[in-house]
Image: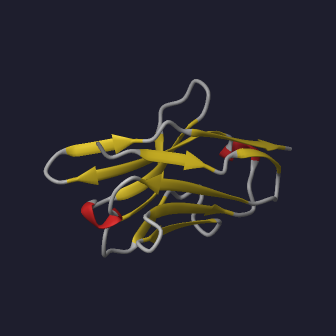
Amino acid sequence: QVQLVESGGGLVQAGGSLRLSCAVSGSIFSFGMMGWYRQAPGMRRELVASRERYGSAIYADSVRGRFTIIRDPASNTLYLQMNSLKPEDTGVYYCNAERPPDESIWGQGTQVTVSS
């Protein structure tokens, strides 16, 4: 059973940075799309950034230019580098991995709080 374990969340002031990690308990090469989602209180879960196994990254308009998604096969870890954080980036961040044909795995989430 593959597991995704997120870490790196916390409380940061606006303008600060955080680096989220998603450790995969198997080979990261077995997954197609991997991504980060977030869910703010009372809001729907939304895609923040994703990257295919050999493709380019996709970013939500609200984070483009500030966030970077990184797939690291050497450590079997998916990262989300978040810079210039804003209060509206606050939420629970979830790691997701998809494996063909129809498997979708979620981590438990990590809280990010950005104070103004």
Q: Quadrant of the C terminus?
A: top right
Q: x and y percent of residue 13 in the render?
A: 85, 50
Q: How many marks?
A: 0
Vertically, is 76 above or below 43? below
Rendered residue at 75%/51% (across/down): 86
Say above or below: 54 vs 13.
below
- Position of residue 12 measured from the top left corner of the image (x, y, whole percent): 81, 49
| Residue 99 shown left or right of residue 81 in the figure | left
Q: Residue furthest left?
A: 101
Question: Seen in the image, is 99 located left or right of residue 20?
Answer: left
Residue under the point 30% across and 75% down? 54
Viewer-side residue, 75 vs 37: 75
Residue at horizontal 54 percent and vertical 47 percent from the top: 6
How is the rendered protein coloured?
secondary structure
User: Quick one: which residue is furthest to the top in this view?
Assistant: 42
Please give the name of the residue rendered at 75% of the width and 60% of the height, measured from the top-left corner. 17
Residue 1: % across, % down: 29, 42
Residue 50 in the figure: left or right of residue 17: left
Q: Please state if 53 lies on the left or on the right of 75 as rendered.
A: left
Where does the image place residue 68, in percent across and percent down from the top left? 57, 68
Residue 4 vertical placement versus 82 (above, below): above
Which quadrant of the view contains residue 27? bottom left
